[in-house]
Amino acid sequence: MTEKIPGATEGFRSGFVMLAGPPNAGKSTLLNRMLGEKVSITSRKAQTTRNRILGVLHRPGAQLVFLDTPGVHKATQALNVRMVDVALSAMGDADLILLMVDLKSPDPDAEGFLVEKLEQQRRPVVLALNKTDQVGPEAVLQAIDRWRTAYPFKAVVPISAKHGHQVDALVAEMLALLPEGPPFFPEDAVTDMPERFIAAEMIREKVFRLTGQEIPYSTAVTIETFKEKPRMIEIYATIHVERTSQKAIVIGRGGAKLKQIGRAAREDMERMLGAKVFLKLFVRVQKNWSRDTRALRKFGY
């Protein structure tokens, strides 16, 4: 557990908030919206987030430390099992749990599994009903009534993470439930994730967004070189896939797809780092890495 910073004023509130939910509920979109910065990658494909991502939200007299976790579901494949374990382990580090569900495309199996896990712990839980912009008012009211009978939530807040609707109200509900205590992080901290990790995630996000079918789920990214030079940051990275056919798709005809991935990732990196970036991408085949325990450890899962 992170040490608190001494010397904060009396009445200050701080705590860890676990972001939990089924795959593709919008947790990473919400985290980025609350922080006003991109620390967690997003895409329309489920299971984009694979690691626990920490984000720090500063408010007058309070600090919320969010733990964005992979989508929780009943997993069988080795990679997915690891991801669900990562998500559920965050419950032990949290002062408060924020459960987020998708109003547009509910996932009853994953939602029921999550409620079972919530019933096994005693931390306060707030529910965010996401994607109100994609359903009608009647559907929102019905969802509120249904969820209030499913679990004793401290608050139920309908939101649109994409457009920011009711997000401030959601933050206010969570602030009221935080314990008193000094902050965990300095006022300028947004995340504790190293820059090379975020750079790798930005590359992986572009693979998710710019390729289709099974390619994103067969992809891992490692940073081989991250050097700060006088006028730029030099980054060499490898995109790992499971089959030769996947490598051909990621590279594209004449290298066009790989260039597109690299260009989009570099633009995000330059915004994050505030410096020019030279990015060189390689693609390598590591057969069935997502089912290989040693490969999962190697790639940080």
Image (cartoon, rainbow, N blue to C red):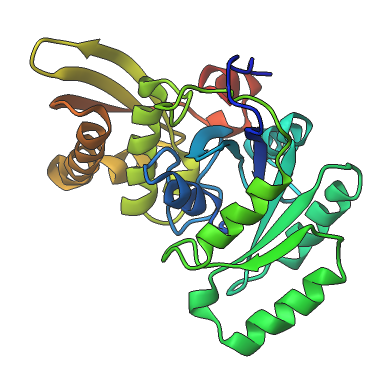
- Please, is residue 135 above or below residue 58 in the view? below
Residue 206 placement, left or right of 144: left
Residue 169 placement, left or right of 125: left
- Please, is residue 145 above or below residue 131 in the view? below
Estimate the x, y position of residue 214 in percent, counting from the top left. Answer: 47, 51
- Please, is residue 22 above or below residue 230 in the view? below
Q: Residue at x 71, y 65 (%)?
A: 156
Confirm whether residue 63 shows in the render. Answer: yes
Q: Residue at x 57, y 61 (%)?
A: 169
Estimate the x, y position of residue 159 in percent, counting from the top left. Answer: 55, 67
Q: Residue furthest left?
A: 231
Estimate the x, y position of residue 286 in percent, counting from the top left. Answer: 46, 26
Estimate the x, y position of residue 243 in percent, counting from the top left. Answer: 43, 37
Q: Residue at x 62, y 32 (%)?
A: 12
Which quarter of the rendering shows the N terminus?
top right
Q: How many marks?
A: 0
Which quarter of the rendering shows the C terminus?
top right
Give residue 256's quadrant in the image.
top left
- Please, is residue 35 above or below residue 114 in the view? above
| Viewer-side residue, 143 vs 269 | 143
Q: Residue furthest right?
A: 120
Give residue 126's quadrant in the image.
bottom right
| Viewer-side residue, 297 vs 24 | 24
Confirm whether residue 21 shows in the render. Answer: no
Residue 216 placement, left or right of 227: right
Q: Residue at x 58, y 53 (%)?
A: 171
Residue 272 placement, left or right of 102: left
Give residue 221's quadrant in the image.
top left
